[in-house]
Image (spheres, rainbow, N blue to C red):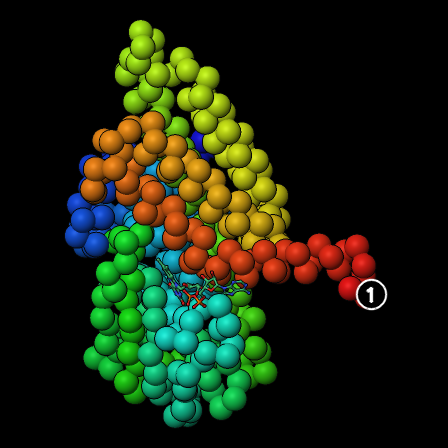
């Protein structure tokens, strides 16, 4: 990693060594052990105070477990916005109608009870961290206005786990709010969908950081495998076809790293256009890196639950989560065209 690490030695060791040892089980069982969450919390990984440091932790964790890296990302992006109350935060925006057109698909409703409290009825889909959450940040309609709410875990919130092929262990679930009593986070008159975009923009840089972690690890896997294998009398690593794969991943990784840094202003604000670009390029980098790792390992790379195979399953999520690639491409194109045509666009 080129940036100086903001993580202490114990947290770094946890993300490098302990996570490497646990990553296979997290993927297979689709669950992060409570003991790992507790240990990570004790090492400060659940109270990271800046976007920059959060992204570093996500990238480092992502080398071995995208599931756990995603737990850190979702919790961290909520905590940076909401503050320190929650032990583990989850963010419920997407509903059964789909995550692309968020505004059109909000069916969860909030009824005012007085004293700042609201009663929530509805269902959220693909809520990461749902299995571990102490608190849920939820998008719901207060009357006709989308607003964000904070709900502490309670019997009137029911979580059903989802079994996805990628980012296993990220605690994704369907969450039913059956009269849950929650507090309103956004003031009346503030658009909750716009407010949610603040979390999502950090999330998009987080997805780019997940991709950087995949690229970091894929390069190691490729170099280790190709240097220990001989084909037609020379090391696999000595073939140009292998070297060019490594060069391509390394060059794109360096470019993405710079883009992520340039999307941050140092004060916690994120440039939304660069965040969208970083997520799109992150999806491409992760798929290229994971594809190459599987290819260079050959048949061994296809072993079910193996490290390269897991990378490949996880890489695809980066194109979908935090906004599908096509939607972000539309957004980037719109902004780019406007810069050329101005009001004529
Ligand atoms: C692992 C994982 C974790 C997630 N965690 C969370 C979470 O914590 N909280 C949360 O609220 N949500 C979460 N999500 C949901 C995520 O944000 C949505 O999956 C994402 O926004 C896409 O929505 P969708 O899957 O409903 O796809 P849909 O909205 O149904 O879209 C389906 C497909 O349509 C295509 N498409 C859409 N729009 C266009 C267009 N304009 N042009 C061309 N093609 C288009 C895309 O290929 C897209 O993949 C998570 C998803 C995953 C996979």
The total of numbered circles placed on residues is 1
Residue 328 appears in the picture as rendered = yes
The answer to which of 19 and 254 lies nearer the viewer is: 254
Residue 180 in the image: state x and y as whole percent. 30, 83
Q: Is residue 140 above or below residue 225?
A: below
Image quarter (top left, top right, bottom left or bottom right) of the C terminus: bottom right
Say which quarter of the image contains residue 109.
bottom left
Most extreme residue toward the top is 233
Residue at the far front in the pictured view: 232
Position of 23 relative to 246 (above/below): below
Mark 1 neighbour class, 10 Å CA radius: few under 14, some 14 to 19, many 20 or more: few
Q: Front-most of 250 and 302?
A: 302
Quadrant assignment for the N terminus: top left
Residue at 58% x, 42% y is 259
**Badge 1 residue CB within 8 Å of ligand 1:** no
Q: Position of residue 302 (x, y in %)?
A: 25, 37
Q: Is residue 19 in view?
A: no
Residue in the image at 54% along x and 39% along y: 256
Q: Is residue 106 left or right of residue 89?
A: right
- Residue wearing tag 1: 344
- Circle 1: element type: helix
User: Residue 140 location, x and y as percent?
Assistant: 43, 80
Left or right of residue 41: residue 319: right
Could you say which is closer to the camera, residue 345 or residue 253?
345
* Residue at x-position 50% and y-position 29%: 248
- Looking at the image, residue 90 lies above or below residue 218: below
Quadrant of ligand 1: it is: bottom left
């Amino acid at each position: 990693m080129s940036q100086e690490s903001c993580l202490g030695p114990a947290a770094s060791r946890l993300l490098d060594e302990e996570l490497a040892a646990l990553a296979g089980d997290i993927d297979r069982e689709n669950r992060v052990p409570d003991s790992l969450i507790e240990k990570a919390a004790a090492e400060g990984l659940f109270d990271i105070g800046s976007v920059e440091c959060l992204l570093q932790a996500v990238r480092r964790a992502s080398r071995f477990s995208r599931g756990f890296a995603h737990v850190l990302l979702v919790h961290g992006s909520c905590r940076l916005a909401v503050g320190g109350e929650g032990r583990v935060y989850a963010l419920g925006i997407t509903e059964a109608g789909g995550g692309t057109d968020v505004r059109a698909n909000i069916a969860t409703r909030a009824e005012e009870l007085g004293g700042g409290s609201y009663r929530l009825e509805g269902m959220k889909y693909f809520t990461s961290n749902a299995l571990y959450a102490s608190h849920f940040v939820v998008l719901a309609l207060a009357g006709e206005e989308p607003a964000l709410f904070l709900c502490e875990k309670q019997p009137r919130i029911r979580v059903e786990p989802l079994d996805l092929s990628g980012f296993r262990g990220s605690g994704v679930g369907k969450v039913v709010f059956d009269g849950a009593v929650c507090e309103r986070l956004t003031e009346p008159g503030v658009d909750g969908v716009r407010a949610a975009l603040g979390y999502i923009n950090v999330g998009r840089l987080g997805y780019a950081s997940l991709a950087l972690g995949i690229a970091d690890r894929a390069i190691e896997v490729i170099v280790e495998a190709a240097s220990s294998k001989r084909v037609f009398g020379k090391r696999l690593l000595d073939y140009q076809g292998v070297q060019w794969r490594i060069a391509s991943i390394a060059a794109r990784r360096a470019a993405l790293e710079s883009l992520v840094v340039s999307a941050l202003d140092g004060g916690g604000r994120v440039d939304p256009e660069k965040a969208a670009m970083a997520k799109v390029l992150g999806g491409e980098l992760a798929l290229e890196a994971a594809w190459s790792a599987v290819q260079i390992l050959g048949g061994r790379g296809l072993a079910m639950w193996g490290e390269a195979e897991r990378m490949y399953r996880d890489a695809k999520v980066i194109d979908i989560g935090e906004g599908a690639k096509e939607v972000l491409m539309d957004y980037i194109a719109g902004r780019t065209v406007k810069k050329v045509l101005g009001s004529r666009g």
